[in-house]
Amino acid sequence: INFGTNNDKEVVETNITYASDTYPDLQKLNILTPTVQKIENRNGIVTSNNVSTWKKWDKGWGPFQEFESRNNDPGKFDWENPDQQPNWLKLSETTNMPEGGVATEMKDVDGMDHSVVYDELYRFPVATFTHASLKNNEAGYFGFEMYEQSGNWTMTPDSINSAHPHTGELSLSNAEPIFIQPKTFNARADNPQYVVSAWVKPSTDGSCQLSFGEEAAVTSKGTDWQYIEAVRGPPFGDDVPKAHCEQGGSIDDFRFGPVDAAFEAHVYNSKFLYYIANIDTNGGTIITEYDHAYRPIKVTGPLPENVTEYEYYFARDSFWGNSLPGSPNYVKTTVNSGEPNAMVNVTYTDGIGTAIQYQSSQDK
């Protein structure tokens, strides 16, 4: 019960239905806390009515569809025929759940695919694609890190190492010829144009190439890390996207997919699994460096000159070194560090880390 400024009384009521009440098998499995329907009303008027259906997948039970009522009196939800109800709008539908209740693919209200590449233990997302199905092998990403799933890739054996990573800790690197391509590729049903991309580091006298059959090829020379991509249209036949360095070199962050499929990849520290890099649709890369306490101290990208640095000072740091603090606790952030007119923001905090004062200035 809430009271407004004019002492108006508002009664808010929430009714919840648990999944175990609708699906008896979940009771047997002791899955008792998930909810399948939530109805909210204010002063007797329904303001929202949302339903989540469940399904028994190959690997066990898990969420299936999401619905929202089109009006405040949609009638009783038909759990047996959820798609045949004009008063209910289907918001999304999970289309693939391979392991432990983790949805890797779903369709949104417009029927567009949203796909997620997980690590091999399905703990965290490695890459995401919008408007492409991973289940149907319409897109893919591989960053060569030890936590990634490598089953759908063919590549030069024994060449993943820590010699020259672009992001993370590993890349495909060798003085001899190297290559990577998917074991299976299927173009999306509407036959859009496709893009294949990678970060490459050619050998001193060599080059690296992206190819998609004979219809698209891009060659990169030089010894620095470079982002390259190639685009081609249908028909694709038996052609598959491929990255290769015939005179040796390094390949990292390889990806392919429809040109209209938004893409993003995330790179993690392999030991402690904290986030260290991000790659966007156009290959833009943001890399985060940390101190011994796992606090970010430097963020670089997507352009090399885009640098943000962080400096931390806490009284306890000096105290443990047997010296008295010389200044209050603070976190200093320098945006575009090293550039003219870099912006400096300082947040002063109390003894428990709560911000108490802010200061901004611009370096001259």
Image (cartoon, rainbow, N blue to C red):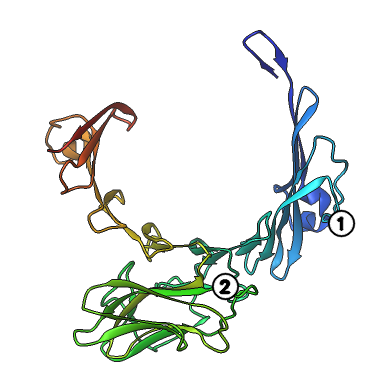
Single out the residue that lies furthest toward the top: 6
Is 212 in front, or is 51?
212
Element type at mark 1: loop
* Residue 207: quarter of image: bottom left
Q: Residue at x 62, y 73 (%)?
A: 135
Q: Which residue is mark 1?
A: 81
Q: Position of residue 172 (x, y in %)?
A: 34, 80
Using a 10 Å C-alpha cutoff, classify the residue at mark 2 as few (fewer than 14 neighbours), some (14 to 19) or many (20 or more).
some
Q: Which one is earlier in the sequence, the residue at label 1 or at label 2? A: 1
Classify the position of the N terminus by image quarter: top right
Classify the position of the C terminus by image quarter: top left
Q: Amino acid at mark 1?
A: Asn
Q: Amino acid at mark 2?
A: Pro
Question: Is residue 313 shown to the viewer in this render?
Answer: no
Is 331 in front, or is 270?
331
Is 308 in front, or is 212?
212
In the displayed structure, does residue 69 sit left or right of residue 233?
right
Question: Is residue 112 shown to the viewer in this render?
Answer: yes
The label nearer to you, 1 versus 2, is: 2
In the displayed structure, does residue 79 sit left or right of residue 355?
right
* Residue 322: quarter of image: top left
* Residue 16: quarter of image: top right
Q: Are marks 1 and 2 in contact (CB under 8 Å)?
A: no
Element type at mark 2: loop
Label number found at residue 192:
2
Q: Position of residue 151 (x, y in %)?
A: 52, 81
Q: Is residue 206 above or below residue 58?
A: below
Q: Is residue 125 above or below residue 357?
A: below
* Separation of marks 1 and 2 at Cα, in angstroms: 34 Å
Label number found at residue 22:
none
